[in-house]
Image (cartoon, rainbow, N blue to C red):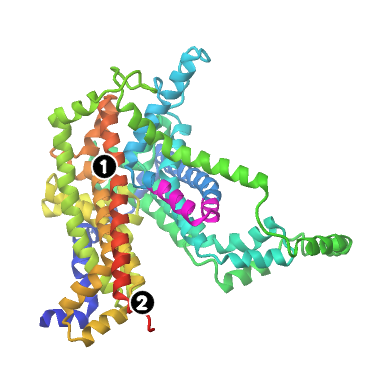
Amino acid sequence: MKTLQTLGRMPIALTGPALAVLLVVFGIPIILLFLTSLNAPAFSVVNYLTFFGQPANVRVLFQTVEISVVATAICLLIGYPTAYLIVAGSKHLRMALIVLVLVPYLTSGLVRTYAWIVILGDRGLINNLLLDHGLISSPLPLIYNRMAVYIGMVHIMLPMMILPLVSVMMGIDKSLMAAARSMGARPSTAFWRVFFPLSMPGVRSGSLLVFVICLGFYITPAALGGLGDAMLSTFIASQVQTSFNMARVAASAFILLAVAILVLSVVGLDLSGTQGRTAQSARKPWLSRSPSFGVLKRYLGEFLAPGRAKRWTAQLYKAGGRSRWSKIVGTVFLALVMFYLLFPEFLVVIMSFSAGRFLEFPPSGLSLQWYRSFFGDPGWYEAAWISVQIGIVVATLSTIVGTLAAYGLSRTNPRLRSFLTMAMLTPITFPVIVVGIATYLGLVKLGLLGSMTGIVLAHTVGAIGYVVVMVSATLANFDLRLEQAAMSMRANPVQTFMRVTLPLIRPGIIGGAMFAFLHSFDEVVITSLIGGFSIRTLPLKMWEDIRHQIDPTIAAVASLMILLPVFILMILYVAGWRSTLSLQRARPAPAA
């Protein structure tokens, strides 16, 4: 009891277990990795000079940045109007569309990559349809090129762009747009002058998240791209598996990390402050500073003033709804985006029931033969059982230490809270190959390489971040007066936490546990580095089969992995519903 009272007075101590895991498995190893890249204790930059001294390495680096920038730009061009249309819909439609975006977001990236192999392959859906209708005589080269890489990467990253945009747009006061319209602004002017600047935090967050994750992409470019589409993460992984020159591997990893940090430090600054706006207004284009331009602008303004006055009077009391054609275009666009996100997964599920010897769409007959193949092959179901075991242990461990950390952070000084939160989120904001190399070095020092314990610790490093985010979001809306009321009724800290705090933050804990399990169950890159050839998880076996042979059994495995996030969303819905009932019971009844 005294220990609990001490922790209550020093909530920062609750972050100790999470920080200890992060430091031992990731923090200290990444510092050692940096020193290794500098050939410590001699300290030289020869490894970096060697990297930049080889034109092939520089070409791969620029290619990595180029692919990441283009994929981020495409995600933004598609994601922004999609998020805008989602927010503009009714409450029930908005929730349904968000769920449709969440399903592919929670689905394994490996499964979605496999779906595009089935669609774009030489004997895939598109080529088969064109061949059957006599439109082509030989398969089109739709796969193993840069376009296929962009299609796969955008499909995986688009939900990560849409969700931050939706979150920010839902917080924008719609009356500001109405006020702009009431002052005579056209819908496009009101959008660009009012709504778009207020949505910039979502644009910045989504773009940074997508770009940094794209930098570390490994599976999708390797599966869908050709030899000329390799990214730096593929190059680093091949170095680990072949030469095993840790100094050069470390240099390559930190060059990739430097790109991510550079972008985060430049774009991640707060660009919405007063200072930024002042500076922006001060830097006018040279044309606007020209005297002749000023005279012409003033003349045109006087000439167009009567027309603007009539339009303002006509539209002052006019309903601000969208036109019929804009609604049709928006609906079609939204339907196409949802089709792009969901059809590949739906296709895999349908084809997994094919009765033929090969995958075909539509199936000539229905059969469970590929599911029987999965459950009848020890290689498949043993790999699945290993993934489930690791996922459960990772979810349990990360949920305990992550919940304690989030609870302690919620009662800590804001500046210290911000610093520690960023430290805990580092493993999920750095490129995954860099995290994998650092974790690999840390587990080598601990002698846990190639063991279940090593994989659990490696997965826990990233899973803690998801738990901290989910539980912290729940605690942000928690009313501390409920705890104070329980204390005033002589409840001790344990009773207060178990009877008051825990029931109200249970949705965040369950959500964090589910995300931690999915993070572990879907992990391929770090697992391939840590597990080596001794441990085969389900995603790792699936990845190896995709690279060497397209076994139709993979479609059955992918279908089961697609159903997993749907099941998890149902759990989160039930948990949130029960929490709402508990909160309603906890609130005092209004006075008569």
Is residue 168 located in the magenta-colored stretch of the structure? no
Residue farthest to the front, as pictured = 592
- Numbered disc 2: secondary structure: helix
Q: Which mark is residue 414?
A: 2
Q: Give the range drawn in magenta.
A: 83-102
* Residue 113: x %, y % from top left: 36, 35
Instruction: Tell me the kind of residue under disc 2.
Output: Pro
Residue 431: % across, % down: 35, 50
Name the residue rendered at 55%, 68% in the picture.
272
Distance (Cα) linking label 2 and label 1 = 36 Å
Q: Is 480 above or below relative to 197? A: below
Write down the residue under mark 1.
524
From what the image shows, is residue 89 above or below residue 336?
Answer: below
Examine the rendered structure and indicate whether residue 71 appears above or below residue 463: above
Residue 137, image x and y in percent?
Answer: 49, 12
- Sooner in the amino-acid sequence: mark 2 or mark 1: 2
Q: Callout 1, which amino acid?
A: Val
